[in-house]
Image: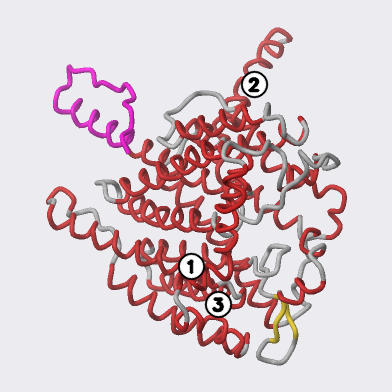
Amino acid sequence: MAFTLTGSQPVRSSVRRTHTLSFLRTHALESFIVMEYACQIGLLSSEVGQARQLVRMLVFGTSIAMLLLLPGRGQAPPAAGPAKLVLAVVGLALFHPNTNTVLAGSAQIGMYLAILAPLFWVPRLKVDTPTLLRLMMIIWIFQTTSAAVGVLQVYYPGSFEPSLAIVTLKMGAGYLKSLQFRNAYGEVTWRAMGLTDTPGGAANAGFYAALLGTGFLLVFRRNLHRLFALGTIIVGLVAIYLSKNRSCLIILTICEVGIAAMIGTRRTLLVLRPEWRKREAGSLPRLLGAVAIAAVLSFSWAIAVGGGSIADRFSSLVADKPTEVYRQNRGYLIEGTMESVLPQYPFGAGIGRWGMMNYYFGDNSNPATAGIWVEEQWTGWLIDGGIPLILAYVLAIFMAFRTAFKIGLSPVEPELAIFAIIICGYDVGAFASSFGYPYFSSQDGLEFWLLNAALFAALSGFRKRVDAESAAKLAQRQPGRVPDTRPRPVQA
């Protein structure tokens, strides 16, 4: 008996490890995104205090841990090649003579690694179309909730507001006043924050609530579910209006037009290619009708809550040229980068000189290596690695978009095709956001690469299932033949 009990312990340990590894491979994506949002909500509490820095680092540290600890290799998506080049450039930047400190520079490199890491660890997981849909639904629900909270913050000023970010509070009274307005009831309120600590932060949540709501509107079969998806699009648009973020509305409009064009193209392919005809890819009339309804209802609702200042803010989009509106709001930052930063630092200014890594770990006592204020991504890239870094990162983004575009117009299952098309719009929105703030140096950037890697992994899972089904059918027709089950490279 003693011998049996002693011998069973390694067996039980092996079984537990197997079950843990199986759970991790199956649910790691959903668990990771839930943890990310839990940390984001935790940062809204003033009780976090000194642990704030650790909470911010937890998500990025987990991404690096997944890269180091997950077994296997998997087939990396096409964007992984340029991503390695990005890491090589920022790694060399550590030896730049004007790097702030070794600690700040190493922390910045670690940030790049954590944000790009999903390209390498997600393919090691078991990902299929249902996994991708669950991941998208978690993001959709969270962003819709954040957008709805933003609407409530303007409805009831002071009731749903978190503590403001330390960086925002340090901007001065004049800047803080510019982030406030009077709602339709005459009360002074912040621009909708949602589940962030920054006035106007609900605009991003509104963007993704509306964008992902479009995808689920096309995927859902029941009318009640479609009605709910339409409601999330409306809530997302209202949050954008109450954040007074015009650029976000423009980007969303461009994305929706692109999605409609791709849906129309795919439906044309269904007609031209008989083998595709059973693969329905969403209803274009349903999409156009829903967007039209959402546009009318959301604008009326936003004015009813936010007052006339909302109409005045967004009427400038048609009163002035869009290029002039952008130049007056954020375009001047890009102009300043091109005119002053680019000639001065074509190959970088040293790493660790901007952003939170400089704030937490930097030493700005030396003017030659002191921190540089950055408000959008392109300046950050230029400082960290100059033109080589910009070219490498933009190539990685393009490869991600190209992969999603090809999947969206390929003969795959309808849900996978629709969300590939939605991720195309997502990628366009992310790239456009990089002109307004450091998108790819934040959790937003990590989420970008997570979604694109999950999409490619889902394609791999779909191809494997198709190959297995084909092999099974062949084995039934030819009982004596052993099917070839070796994995084949996935072409996106």
Residue, disc 1: 210
Circle 2: residue type? Arg
Earlier-in-chain disc, 3 versus 2: 2
321 w.r.t. 35: above or below: below
Circle 3: residue type? Val
Residue, disc 3: 238
Q: Can you tell which mark lies on residue 412?
A: none
Badge count = 3
Q: Which portion, as a residue range, is magenta? A: 463-492
Instruction: Residue 400: say if magenta.
Output: no
Structural distance between the alpha carbons of marks 3 and 1 = 10 Å
Task: Give residue 229's position: percent from left, percent from top.
Answer: 46, 69
Instruction: Residue 467: say if magenta.
Output: yes
Q: In the image, what residue occupies the spot 18% across and 50% down? A: 276
Front residue (pair 317, 60): 317
Does the residue at mark 3 contact the one at mark 2 (Cβ under 8 Å)?
Answer: no
Q: In the image, what residue occupies the spot 56% across and 28% down? A: 88
Q: Secondary structure at mark 2?
A: helix
Task: Give residue 11's position: percent from left, percent from top.
Answer: 62, 17
Looking at the image, residue 485 sits to the left or right of residue 430; the answer is: left
Q: Can you tell which mark lies on residue 12?
A: 2
Q: Secondary structure at mark 1?
A: helix
